[in-house]
Image (spheres, coloured by chain):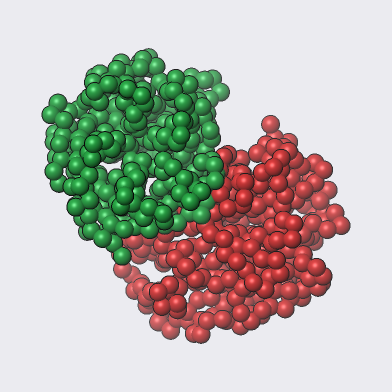
Chain colours: A red, B green
Amino acid sequence: MNVYRYPENPVISPKDIPPYLQGYEVIGVFNAGVIRHGEEIILLLRVAERPINHDPKVGLSPYYDVESSSMGVHKLKKGVPGYNFSDSRGIGTPDGSLLTSISYLRIGRSRDGIHFAIDDRPALFPENQYEIYGIEDCRITQIDDTYYINYSAVSNLGITTCLASTKDFSYIQREGVIFHPDSKNIAIFPQKINGKYYALHRPSSSSFGKPCMWIAESPDLLCWGNHRYLMGCREGEWDEARIGASCVPIKLEEGWLEIYHGADRNNEYCLGAVLLDAEQPWRVIARSRLPLLKPETPYEKEGFFGNVVFSCGALYENQRVKIYYGAADTSTCYAEIEMTDILNGMKEVG
Amino acid sequence: MNVYRYPENPVISPKDIPPYLQGYEVIGVFNAGVIRHGEEIILLLRVAERPINHDPKVGLSPYYDVESSSMGVHKLKKGVPGYNFSDSRGIGTPDGSLLTSISYLRIGRSRDGIHFAIDDRPALFPENQYEIYGIEDCRITQIDDTYYINYSAVSNLGITTCLASTKDFSYIQREGVIFHPDSKNIAIFPQKINGKYYALHRPSSSSFGKPCMWIAESPDLLCWGNHRYLMGCREGEWDEARIGASCVPIKLEEGWLEIYHGADRNNEYCLGAVLLDAEQPWRVIARSRLPLLKPETPYEKEGFFGNVVFSCGALYENQRVKIYYGAADTSTCYAEIEMTDILNGMKEVG
């Protein structure tokens, strides 16, 4: 695949972001939702901060305490049986998982799409029981004059997907939990199809099968149903272990073009594409043979969680897909791919 | 708790049910949805059948093959690493769980509520990709002149909840998947509250928290959203490990009375009750201190999966709650409890 990576990637790194929380450090700025808003390109960046740890014998897990409206930190002694510190992102405990950082959303604004001015304060910070471990990986869908933002809310109640809306990115209104635990990687289509809204989603089953892509419909963007299995993992391929929607679907003459992510058994995350029927988006027409983008550069291969390219948003302008993507769960990068190259790299399904 | 158990329980046992599938045996008839339909009481029974196994060295897992519209059986050699045969209900494999039996729904009809004539043929048998491992644990909610049936559909895609509807229990119309994987134990309220339908549900998270009760709303019974956490497990109590809705909520002056099930760390399943606010059913008013019903008799303590009482439906008539319940995942039993006893055994929450 012919990919143009911006030569000075990453375009945003943790060092560019002063921490919002006192006593914390920014370890990631990645997986941003993106939209063009007038003259500006808006990124709704996932910023991950973690408490600065002075004691190597303990692991720290930050959380938002709803009752006191302030941050708290769980301290967990290493070496205790039943506790697992092997994944940099989380701590396994007998009562369920904890996270080593807390994420929230922060706005970046740019006129050239490369140089972003980052807001000092969060646009969306945890504030209720569904969000106590953080707000992650949003997507932005414009429908008429409203921007709908869906994001993963993580807590001891599971991973839900919540909706919020804004007209101007100054005030963002929360609209509630739209997908129950566990759900992730929701991408809402930017227009109704035959009178209904549609969204791609990625439920995960505790004991049956692998995490794969589904599609749901809605009369109002808040209530979702008629869930249908859309497509699964491909044994022995780059997307063999789990897949999920990445970007908001792009309308083409050929159908809906969805850039999705997939991981293999070694947790290498790549981006691919799938083409869905224009009128019946639950029908898969074609799918990328090979990844569009795979971790190749040092900033993609090394970081907080290496060997990851992961996108939550792209712009489609001048026949080019302009992809903003998280690299190694650490930084925000930029790449461009010609749409014709994407379509030529697909294989018909059926 | 003052419980009247029908002295000749179980009212329906596997021996009362001829198998529907050739070469299979009925191992369970349990967890029935119930409704009064004219002069009759209708049970929509979960019947579990398993292939008769002549080889103790293998485990069998039946499934419905959608392409050929016929049954298939996975044969799994015992003693192979990575395969777990310790739970009578399922087989753990490296690619996910399989079940040792296949369930479907069959109608029982009665005038006295005790003696049931069972249909020869299934009312709802697996027929699509969401149902290949079976159809389980339905609830029946009457709204106006329609009976809505929701059930767990199990497959390699996960456990979803599907909706079906009927006016007469002769033809049942499938309405699609209403809750994505994993979801179970949905109970739809029998009327709109302030213009919206409501349902209790039980999502399960793969790594965060315990399976607990949530409530969702809907404009049309098909699409569900505004998911809210309702109540959780109680550490050290009979409902410490997992809980879920059992019966369709009963409207009282005091609020909505829900009979739910809970299990402890030893997998003993009991029934309890919770009272929800009449106008704001996401608010818990009171909850049973002790179980209403717990496994005590031999038919509840011993069976395919022992120490289980589990209900999917009750009738509320003459101030008495008439509970149909599955005993030991094997048979269908009947009990009555005075509503005043249930309410007196509750503890206010909040």
- Percent x, y of residue B16: 25, 18
Give the quarter of the image for residue B45. top left
Q: Is residue A191 left or right of residue A218?
A: right
Q: Is residue A303 visible?
A: no
Residue drawn 66% across the image and 68% down it: A44
Pick whichever, A141 or A317, lies toward us. Answer: A141
Pick whichever, A54 or B225, lies toward us. Answer: B225
Q: Is residue A3 above or below residue A111?
A: above
Q: Is residue B270 left or right of residue A251?
A: left
Residue drawn 36% across the image and 73% down it: A76
Q: Is residue A13 visible?
A: yes
Q: Is residue B249 left or right of residue A158?
A: left
Pick whichever, A341 or A294, lies toward us. Answer: A341
Q: Is residue A223 above or below residue A349?
A: below
Q: Is residue B29 left or right of residue B202?
A: left
- Percent x, y of residue A218: 61, 46
- Percent x, y of residue A309: 65, 60
- Percent x, y of residue A254: 80, 41
Q: Is residue A299 above or below residue B302?
A: below
Task: Report the number of numbered marks.
Answer: 0
Residue drawn 85% across the image and 54% down it: A319
Give the quarter of the image for residue B100. top left
Image quadrant holding the C terminus of chain A, namely top right
Give the quarter of the image for residue A193. top right
Residue drawn 31% across the image and 58% down it: B285
